[in-house]
Amino acid sequence: MNASPVSEFSGADTAVGAKLVYDIAEGSASMKSLLGGKGAGVAEMTRLGVPVPDGFIVTTQACVAVTAAGGQWPDQLWDQVLDSLRRLEQRTGRGLGSTTKPLLVAVRSGAVVSMPGMMDTILNLGLSGDTVDALGAEFGNPRFAWDSYRRFIAMYGEVVEGVPAYVYSDALDALKKRRGVTQDTELSTDDLRELVTTFLALSRDHIGRDIPTDPTDQLRRAIDAVFASWRNPRAQVYREINGIPDDLGTAVNVMQMVFGNRGNTSATGVCFTRNPSTGAKELYGEFLTNAQGEDVVAGIRTPRPLAEMESVLPQAFRQLTETMAAVEAHYRDMQDMEFTVEDGVLYLLQTRNGKRTAAAAVQIAADLVAEGVIDRAEALQRIEPAQLDQLLHPTIDAGAKGEPLTVGLNASPGAAVGGVVLDEATAQSRAHAGEAVVLVRWETTPDDIAGVVAAQGILTAHGGMTSHAAVVARGMGKPCVAGASSIAIDMDARTVTIGGQVFAEGDVISLDGATGEVFAGALPLVPPQITEGFRRVLGWADDVRRLGVRANADTGEDARRARDFGAEGIGLCRTEHMFMDPARLPAVRRMILAADDDTRAAALAEILPMQQGDFEEIFTAMSGLPVTVRLLDPPLHEFLPSLVNQALEVQRLELTGGGASEIAEASALLARIRSLSEQNPMLGLRGVRLCLVYPQIPEMQVRAIARAALAVSTAGSEPRPEIMIPLVAFEEELKRMRELVQRVMDEEFAAAGRSVEYSIGTMIELPRAALCADEIAAHADFFSFGTNDLTQTTLGISRDDAEGAFLAQYRRDGVITANPFATVDADGVGQLVEIGVRKGRSAKPSLKVGVCGEHGGDPASIEVWNRIGLDYVSCSPYRVPIARFAAARAALGA
Amino acid sequence: MNASPVSEFSGADTAVGAKLVYDIAEGSASMKSLLGGKGAGVAEMTRLGVPVPDGFIVTTQACVAVTAAGGQWPDQLWDQVLDSLRRLEQRTGRGLGSTTKPLLVAVRSGAVVSMPGMMDTILNLGLSGDTVDALGAEFGNPRFAWDSYRRFIAMYGEVVEGVPAYVYSDALDALKKRRGVTQDTELSTDDLRELVTTFLALSRDHIGRDIPTDPTDQLRRAIDAVFASWRNPRAQVYREINGIPDDLGTAVNVMQMVFGNRGNTSATGVCFTRNPSTGAKELYGEFLTNAQGEDVVAGIRTPRPLAEMESVLPQAFRQLTETMAAVEAHYRDMQDMEFTVEDGVLYLLQTRNGKRTAAAAVQIAADLVAEGVIDRAEALQRIEPAQLDQLLHPTIDAGAKGEPLTVGLNASPGAAVGGVVLDEATAQSRAHAGEAVVLVRWETTPDDIAGVVAAQGILTAHGGMTSHAAVVARGMGKPCVAGASSIAIDMDARTVTIGGQVFAEGDVISLDGATGEVFAGALPLVPPQITEGFRRVLGWADDVRRLGVRANADTGEDARRARDFGAEGIGLCRTEHMFMDPARLPAVRRMILAADDDTRAAALAEILPMQQGDFEEIFTAMSGLPVTVRLLDPPLHEFLPSLVNQALEVQRLELTGGGASEIAEASALLARIRSLSEQNPMLGLRGVRLCLVYPQIPEMQVRAIARAALAVSTAGSEPRPEIMIPLVAFEEELKRMRELVQRVMDEEFAAAGRSVEYSIGTMIELPRAALCADEIAAHADFFSFGTNDLTQTTLGISRDDAEGAFLAQYRRDGVITANPFATVDADGVGQLVEIGVRKGRSAKPSLKVGVCGEHGGDPASIEVWNRIGLDYVSCSPYRVPIARFAAARAALGA
């Protein structure tokens, strides 16, 4: 940095005469983009008549101009700062650098959006060896003056000159140790004077020269440090990743100092106008007497609850509570405020809308409506939909957390505590014996489903946010930590090493699915609550939203839960999970391995009544509401042992002298698995292809649906089945399946002498289906966009493999900003859905169009679905409330 | 069928007064769609003054009306037939059913497009017990009359009444046996009279009543049988599969009989105006004296070469050769004609453009241009591009073929003869020892590549036209029969069973890749020829086409061959095949298995000079022409042993007491393979993703390209490298890779103190890339649509798995008409390419756009590429001539 400012004035291209510095009194809340959040806040409070220290604000535009010029200041900027400073000196009757009545200022950055890594605050600027005595003399408190001076040096050294913070804190600690005291406040004036000398010497050692003593020079360098912090690499990367424009800039607030460290009639504190954790309308905050702002945050002294201020500083306390009420009423939202009391006089230093938990957000919004402060639409816009997830799962008590063993991906929220189990069978047997278990696997496959059902939560070494384990876990509302790469399983020893610590089966661990943390032992849990306030807010959301909300549910239990959560039907009932039931798998395998049609028919006949029973339970639970049943979708080999395992089994039998018939049987199974195995099963024999190659399977399923619907309607329920054909790419596929479904339905209705209403539709989950949706719509009553598979094919990314292989790195490196399996890729996949909807409706205006899968319950994606004009979304039962809410937000254009 | 025609007249909705029957003399060649091919041919010959029997034609429109009415005739049809019949009787002075001068007619179907399974011909209609004697008396030849009568009964019984043909032929054979003769002509008049009695009795037995004796009734039923044959299921399916509209209909020709069976001055025959096998302008045809048409085809008597007719029937022969010349000149194309000589007088019964081999098509087109008959553009339209494939591969001598052992899919044309080998190692060792080998596998994988290289041809039990084996084989121009499901490999016995016959390794078989046939032993081969005529035609194609044609080539040898075949550059140089070279695989594996960056860098440093050498050879071969080098694309695990094999190896070592260090090493490799293995490698860590995760790999490759280009330009060649980034889905991926490529290029150019021109582009092979092509184009100089992968993702079909799993069945069942991996799916994939081109050029008008992969060399797809407006196609070297030709056809709108 150049000591002579003039040489740096070389023409950044801000228009001559542009106003780059505002007095606080000139600003208002509406000028946030120009003055930053902090600046607009103090300006607005000034307008309200709230006591705020005087000062001025260097605008974000000044920062933008400096950034654009690579750090050079525009010609008029320094002059405007000096003008503002002169006016401030006149209003306060003090002078920066004055040795009689010195003006001290606080310099604070104030971006529109706060971001980590940016310079924050320098207090007590204006102090130097020349002015410190004047300050002490003026207030008759030399200790206060020297305390302020040592604070200034440390803050200036750190944020302007880049001296590491520990340099000053170590010196302070050493001094306290020498003096045998624990609190800063116990140091004497002489101690502080000595500390200043030490700090100045340490600063010189680190930066190679003295800290400037001219306060005007200090001010310019402090402002410039704020500008520079906007340009630092960490802030740049942060902006890039979070999509914050580079040309937003940060403002710089320069305010007259008020002193919370002028003795015991002075204090500093933070307060919230409501409880940010629960939303309750109650006193919430902390304060410290004889302290400056950073002492509260630094935790060196333990702050006191705000309520105690009533007895310590009663007048300031009354004034503060009145001010809190007035400012909240003005902003019509809960405020997070900072204040200082200088010798009994209250000053507000900052106000902003307070961050809050989901529970608090819901409660505050509901209360503000009840208080008549905001209307329902605004209440809905005050709550972040993604945050609501917190409310629907039990969580680990944050206060009880120690150091995690490892941190994986927060794949499914909630908390799980249980004994480690390493395979499905152990999970089932231990769970059956009443033990809570956590399933730990390299990764999960559909084979593990019973283990997942039995477990409290899942921990995997591989796989991402959308891996099989994660998707299944979220679908079941079970916590899951995925892709915890530092765990290693030893199946021979039946142990797992987590973060270097070895756990045998049965050893208890705790997972926090919301953070991805894994802990040793059993941590205490906090149960989920759907509060009255939450129910009320969801009711308002239902009044506003245009999108219908259904659930993905495969069992009667899921269906009932979904209905409790407000689902208006089932958008996706996956029949394959019914096939995976251990009681049915033998018949399913006989069906797959059948050498002839009769054997296959016999196996299917065994499965039919089981499926019928499932459908009866679901239709009953969803009586009067539509239930979309997807016919069998996955490749058949998913129901058989894995190729590798079976090949090993055959070799093992051969090498260990297995019987000839045993070997023959194992080899025959291996041959069948091999013949069904595929390079890319995702793109293989599944969905409608399976239906057309093995028409006996969909016939059985349709028959089960028909019989179930007939049975429950006899029992007084109102079934509304919608039969959905998966993975259609060609018009002809759907045409033929429609004929099959209608034929079987007609047969069953004829046999029963009765019929029920039903419809036939298709998943749109391949790019071709979307591109040719007009042709396909001719044979469909409805479309359901299967955006999981549509994302896999449109992006050419396998959901099961991608997270660990490259997708996580892509996000870290900023190649992409969001996981496309969590939030829909609007540009690519969204474009295809739009084409599909447009073409589908052009061919059939009555076409009903929805979306199912992960993106049906994701708030950001729901905005896309609302914009495209879908009729409904369908998501896991646990996300139904979030979807209802997000749909309302989308409808409001929030 | 109702004996009383009147009751069937119930109002099919053909306009009253529509003309449904034409006299032959009223027609012409231009009325083909109304009169059918046969009818238009005889009408046109009549106009030319060529002697053709008189008659009339029931139009295709009549057939359409009857078909639409479910078989009922429109009101006026029968009346019009009777009117035409009356006029024919008047012109000929004969009467249908006349017992003095009976009119006999031939009834022939005559569709616009011929198709199998349709009724063809009934000769001698009009004969009955009442008329046969009059016919014999008129010509003083009762034997001829009874011969004609027995022929009529057999033909009528078969095609109108559905009596199986063997019923009549068995009775004929039995009679000849009883008489001790071998030729029909040796039967006496009495024999034939007896045969008629037998035929009538057999007909009665089969159809439960007598064949009608009223010739008018016979005529009506015969015409109706032609109509019915249009509606039969086999014809319907054929039309559906081949995209022939149902409302084309077939015409029915009714012509006065002329008799080739009136003794030795009579004859019947077929002739071509040029040799349909070679195209030579020479006499080509066959004839039989004292015979009717079907005798030539039936093969009971061996026909005589046409040249011999000169001595037997000199006048008719002279007349025939003059007529052939005249008709060919009129149609300006080689004709396939049928004729009859009745007592020395020539009649032409049919003429049509003759089917011909590819060689003949090329030769004839070239000759016709040379003769001034047609121009070049028309010559190009006379040759079917797909057929040209025949000319570019050696073929089995068709005359030497016996019964095939089995018939698989004709996956890659050409012929291979060699000893059976069952694995890559055996293929290599035996080939190295000088033996010609055929690799027989369940299916092939990239592991087998060296075996494929070593073999003459490939035979697989699994996989389709576009399986790995097929694609690789076509790329190398090697014959391949794929999906031969009747073969079974026994690796323990080291034998393969083909069609029930067991072959040990080394036993010789022959494959015909053009037909899918497999033969035992060594069959003689016919070598491929690029004739002078072919070269000339290709030159004309080059003058006409708009699309550029490049080749896919990975080696200098391929590049030289491609240039010989007329390639204008390389559109796709796949660098992974360079990695697969057995000499390099160890270094490649070290690179993949590297535990740290230094080890990886060392391995890459070893590979760099080898890649550089490859590029130098290719750049030299393609001096002055662009060479598009695709950076490494496939998943890394393709370079390692398979997961199953390595798992088996580890278990084998464990169970058979392998050494601890050996087990540890094998287990470590297994762990790495497992960590790289993917559920769906096609959608996994490959292409640009691999480049961004392991940037050292593309850096090495770009460095090799730069150094190779610098080296060959020093040596006087003109390298034009185009660096292509595969599998881009997101703009940011290409942006970063462009930066990497430019940086490495700059480094190399700086080090050399020189530079070469190069460009950077991307494959568009994912739907998202096409949909977002405007964003991606910002960072690309060119796009190459990788339609293999684009088809896989757009249709959600894995090329490696689909053929046997469902795609073959889809085609058999008519769900789809063409293999989408052979001919591009224009509606879906074509639509995406169109979007990609439009968006790409909208963002960058100078963008160069091509296509590479299977669809680059497929004529039907090339039409699509031409329509969409691509700049070039790229295909395997062996398809370059076809692509040049097809591009010309597409440009001509043929």
Image (cartoon, coloured by chain):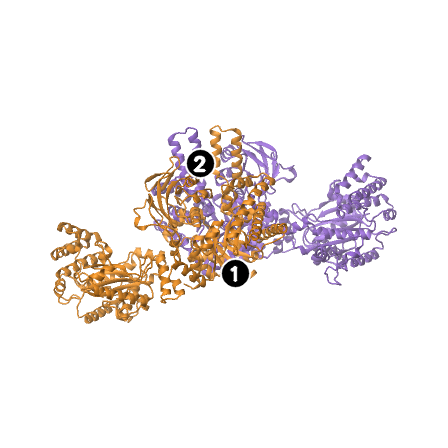
Chain colours: A orange, B purple
Residue in the picture at 81% in, 53% down = B216
Q: Report whether A163 appears left or right of B615.
A: left
**Residues at marks 1 and 2, common chain?**
no
Is A652 drawn above or below residue B253 in the view shown?
A: above
B406 relative to B324, above or below: above
| Quadrant in the rendering for residue B86 | bottom right
Position of residue B490 relative to residue A65, above or below, is above
> Along the line of sight, which residue is nearer the eye, B573 or B99?
B99
Parent chain of label 1: A
Give the side of residue A294 with respect to residue B774, left or right.
Answer: left
Amino acid type for the residue under numbered disc 1: Arg
Q: Position of residue A615 (x, y in %)?
A: 53, 49
- Work out whether residue B29 or residue A719 is closer to the camera in this orientation and state it: A719
Asked if one can make out residue B566 in the rendered structure from this viewpoint, the answer is no
- Relative image position of residue A502 (x, y in whole percent): 33, 39
User: B693 and A408: which one is in front?
Assistant: A408
Q: State whether residue B661 appears in this view.
A: yes
Task: Give the quadrant of residue B80.
Answer: bottom right
Provide the residue designation for mark 1.
Answer: A838
Residue under label 2: B646
> How far apart, in angstroms, are the residues tagged by discs 1 and 2?
50 Å
Q: Between tags 1 and 2, which lies in front?
A: 1
Identify the chain of the residue marked 2, using the numbered disc in the image: B
Q: Which mark is residue A180?
A: none
